[in-house]
Image (cartoon, rainbow, N blue to C red):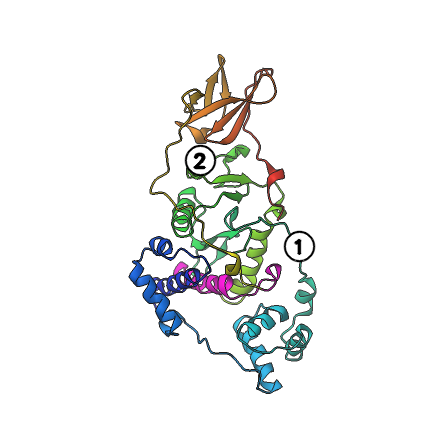
Amino acid sequence: MPWREVSVMSERREFVRLALQEGANRRELCRRFGISADIGYKWLARWRAGDEALADRSRRPLTSPQRSSSALEAAVLEVRQAHPAWGARKIKQCLANQGVETPAISTVHEILRRHGRIDPLSSSANRASQRFEKAAPNLMWQMDFKGWVALTGGQRCHPLTIVDDHSRFVPCLTACADQQSRTVQTHLESTLRRYGLPEAIFVDNGSPWGAPGGEPWTKLGVWLLKLGVDVWHSRPYHPQSRGKNERFHRTLKDEVFALQRFSDFDQLQRAFDRWREVYNFERPHEALGQAPPASRYRPSPRPMPERPPRIEYDERETTRLVTVNGRIGFRRRFWKVSKAFQGERVAIRPLASDGRFGVFFASRLIATIDLTNQQSVSDLSEHVSAMSPG
């Protein structure tokens, strides 16, 4: 089956599941998925009627409360066979979602152990942990590249991942041939058109999020600021501050890469599409009380504009154009901002302390000026303390 056909089927199912959520704006979803309202409502009707054209697996229960314990064991093992990385908690929740009266988690665990499906070492290392999270969807997305993966055809794949901080919903999982800024922006554009704009995106300091020499701002970051999406960087050498993304990468490794090798990008992307659907809409998540991420996610009400809006300032403000070398002139001295803002207009606003000014791009403070210091300003470090520690 061609990759495009698989992707279309996944897109149809994702549209239906998002459209069926409480309070969903179905006409806006139709626009973002590039379909007419008539088509969207037709898919909803077919889904409600149980049309198999929208699903690649049967929706019937694996078993029922009236069946014997041997049938229950078979149901547990069937879920485990379909999802080899899932433990007793997830399997119990999956069966409960299908209307199966399941025993205690310890009983499900014993069934797995008795049939040789438990690895004691990996099981003992799997402990639930509590992490900070944003209060609502789309307040912050965590974005990163998983470490490259070798394809059997000899190429390297760089999976690009985005995780919503509140819900753990994954709006983007893409098999990329490189980690270039243009590649990221292309996939990010399609993701933003479908799910809307988050308030902020949390990234690390490496390329393409940060520039060489430790400079935090890149053209990609400036593009996001123009869209009204703030960009935050984690503290250097502290990957735990992006804990949800790091944890997602471990799950991706356990549930996709540990089970199969892939020959090319198309084959891997097909696997990503299938698994992302399961992860978002079906897979129980311990941090969410065994609910799937989609139960807590809603697309952003802020649509992606056709083009980034022009940054406007009050006519009474002091503004400067950033030069080709990333500097601005103020009070007969030159001050460093960032080359990423070359050709952009910034505003200079006084801060609370005498002799100190902030350099703002729209409402974002990107640098400071200290007239009492004889040296030019350096780039403003990111406000790490305001970030989610995981």
Tell me the quadrant of the picture where the N terminus can be found: bottom left
- Amino acid type shown at disc 2: Val
Disc 2 designates what residue?
A: 222
SS at mark 2 in the image: helix
Q: Residue at x 53, y 44 (%)?
A: 202
- Residue 273: image quadrant is bottom left
Helix, strand or loop for disc 1: loop
259 shown above or below 340: below
Residue lying furthest front: 23
Q: Nearer the viewer, residue 272 or 312?
A: 312
Residue 220 point in image, percent of width and height: 44, 39
Residue 321, percent across and down?
41, 23
Mark 2 neighbour class, 10 Å CA radius: few under 14, some 14 to 19, many 20 or more: some
Q: Which residue is mark 1?
A: 130
Taking depth in this image into account, of 58 and 36 the one nearest to the observer is: 36
Query: Relative to 27, is 251 on the left or the right?
Result: right
Residue 263 showing in the rendered view: no
Q: Which residues are magenta?
A: 261-290
What is the crowding at mark 1: few (fewer than 14 residues within 10 Å), some, or many (at least 20)? few
CA distance separating discs 2 and 1: 33 Å
Q: Residue at x 39, y 27 (%)?
A: 343
Dominant secondary structure (helix, strand or loop) of the stretch shown in magenta:
helix
Q: Is residue 338 magenta?
A: no
Quarter occupied by residue 41:
bottom left
